[in-house]
Image (cartoon, helix red, strand yellow):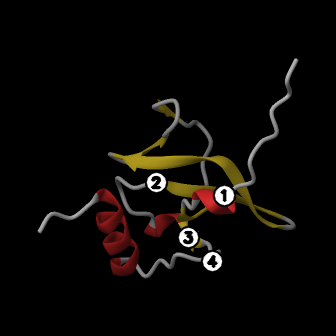
């Protein structure tokens, strides 16, 4: 029986103690090769980035643009599309 990439991601989260809820995990525990929501710790708490990223060979990659991210996150959690608000289109 073949495993889907989503199954692989779930296995990675379980192995690292990450959950599929809103809890943030220290960035040091981030798995490689799966879509994550990254965030930076601010005075008011962890502020999420609005796009999914994936760590590849120790480098954070913006999944949508396949480009390195030059900002350093402090926390991560599984990327869940339903959690992210949809951006309203601005029909010109």
Q: Nearer the viewer, residue 22 or 55?
A: 22
Q: Earlier in the sequence, mark 4 or mark 2?
A: 4
- Which residue is disc 2 drawn over? 35
Residue drawn where x is 21% and y is 64% of the image: 3
| Residue 87 in which image quadrant | top right
- Give neighbour class at mark 1: few <14, some 14-19, many 20+ (Cα, 10 Å): many
Residue 80 relative to residue 50: left or right: left
- Which residue is disc 3 drawn over? 26
Q: Which mark is residue 23?
A: 4
CB of mark 2 within 8 Å of CB of mark 3?
Answer: no
CB of mark 4 within 8 Å of CB of mark 2?
Answer: no
Q: Which mark is residue 39?
A: 1
| Front: mark 2 or 3 | 2
Instruction: Measure how far apart labels 1 and 3 are at the Cα level.
Output: 10 Å
Q: Residue 86: image x %, image y %?
A: 74, 48
| Residue 79 in which image quadrant | bottom right
| Front: mark 2 or 1 | 2
CB of mark 1 within 8 Å of CB of mark 4?
Answer: no
Instruction: Measure how far apart labels 4 and 3 are at the Cα level.
Output: 10 Å
The furthest residue to the front: 91
Instruction: Measure how far apart labels 1 and 4 are at the Cα level.
Output: 11 Å
**Does 86 appear above or below 11?**
above
The furthest residue to the left: 1
Q: Residue 17: image x %, image y %?
A: 43, 82
Looking at the rendered image, the quarter that the N terminus falls into is: bottom left
């Amino acid at each position: 029986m073949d495993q889907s990439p989503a199954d692989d991601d779930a296995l990675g989260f379980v192995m690292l103690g990450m959950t599929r809820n809103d809890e943030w995990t220290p960035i040091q525990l981030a798995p490689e090769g799966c879509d994550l929501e990254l965030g930076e710790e601010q005075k008011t708490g962890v502020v999420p980035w609005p796009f999914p990223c994936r760590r590849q060979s120790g480098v954070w990659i913006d999944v949508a643009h396949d480009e390195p991210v030059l900002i350093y996150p402090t926390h991560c959690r599984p990327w869940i599309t339903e959690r992210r608000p949809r951006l309203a289109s601005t029909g010109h």
